[in-house]
């Protein structure tokens, strides 16, 4: 298995299993009922696995499994990620920082090109530092969630009785 503790954005895997899609989905759902540390959400062709509320923290990961059937075998695609709320917070924060940086750049360089003082350009390094702090925080959160990600991954491997490499 590859090193899951390395820093990646949304680690994933693709796994082929010699079972029909419905049989594999049923097996996973039955195992989830027996393991009280996990909760799940099922939609046909998709299963979301996450930790129960009592075990969750802000950075807790979840695993999204999607199933496609090809020639009597099932292709499982797994995608690890944070709670969608966490993902949205970081996405929109980076979006806002980018838009503010764009506005500051346009305004500041326009004023500067007119030969006036462009003190607003000092906001660009501040924006960069904020973005760097957010990046470090996300990496810290990913490290905090590493053990839970291992737990979910090992749970999946135990169900399929196969080693699955994460990329």
Image: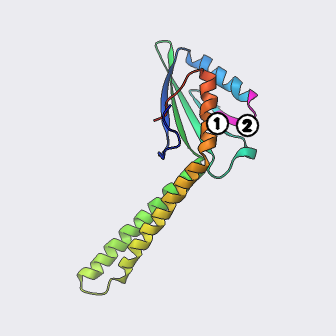
**Which residue is depicted at the point 37% across and 73% down?**
104
Residue 76, image x, y percentages: 52, 26
Would you say 46 lies left or right of 132 here?
Answer: right
Q: How is the image coloured?
A: rainbow
Marks 1 and 2, how far apart at CA:
10 Å
Query: Which residue is label 1 attached to?
Result: 151
Q: In the structure shown, which secondary structural element does the residue marked by tag 1 occupy?
A: helix
Above or below residue 9? Residue 157 is above
Above or below residue 154? Residue 90 is below
Above or below residue 106? Residue 112 is below
Q: Mark 1: few, some, or many residues within 10 Å (few <14, many ≥20)?
A: some
Q: Is residue 48 at least partly visible in the picture?
A: no
Magenta residue span: 34-41
Q: In the structure shown, which secondary structural element does the residue marked by tag 2 occupy?
A: loop
User: Tag 2 or tag 1, which sits nearer the N-term?
Assistant: 2
Q: Is residue 146 at least partly visible in the picture?
A: yes
Q: Nearer the viewer, residue 24 or 45?
A: 24
Residue 97 quadrant:
bottom left
Residue 36 sits inside the magenta stretch: yes
Residue 79 sits inside the magenta stretch: no
Query: Which residue is label 2 attached to?
Result: 37
Would you say 136 lies left or right of 161 here?
Answer: left
**Residue depth check, mark 1 versus mark 2: number of the one nearer the observer:** 1
Asked if the residues shown at circle 1 and circle 2 are in contact, with their CB atoms under 8 angstroms apart, the answer is yes
């Amino acid at each position: 298995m590859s090193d899951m503790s390395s820093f990646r954005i949304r680690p994933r895997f693709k796994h082929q299993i010699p079972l029909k899609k419905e049989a594999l989905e049923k097996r996973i759902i039955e195992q989830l009922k027996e393991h009280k540390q996990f909760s799940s959400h099922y939609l046909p062709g998709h299963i979301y696995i996450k930790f129960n509320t009592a075990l969750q923290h802000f950075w807790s990961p979840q695993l999204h499994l999607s199933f496609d059937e090809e020639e009597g075998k099932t292709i499982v695609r797994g995608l690890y990620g944070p709670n969608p709320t966490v993902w949205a917070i970081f996405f929109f924060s980076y979006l806002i920082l980018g838009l503010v940086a764009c506005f500051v750049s346009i305004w500041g360089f326009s004023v500067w090109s007119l030969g006036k003082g462009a003190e607003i350009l000092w906001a660009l390094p501040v924006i960069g530092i904020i973005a760097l702090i957010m990046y470090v925080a996300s990496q810290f959160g990913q490290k905090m969630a590493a053990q839970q990600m291992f737990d979910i991954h090992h749970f999946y491997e135990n169900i399929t009785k196969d080693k699955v490499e994460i990329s």
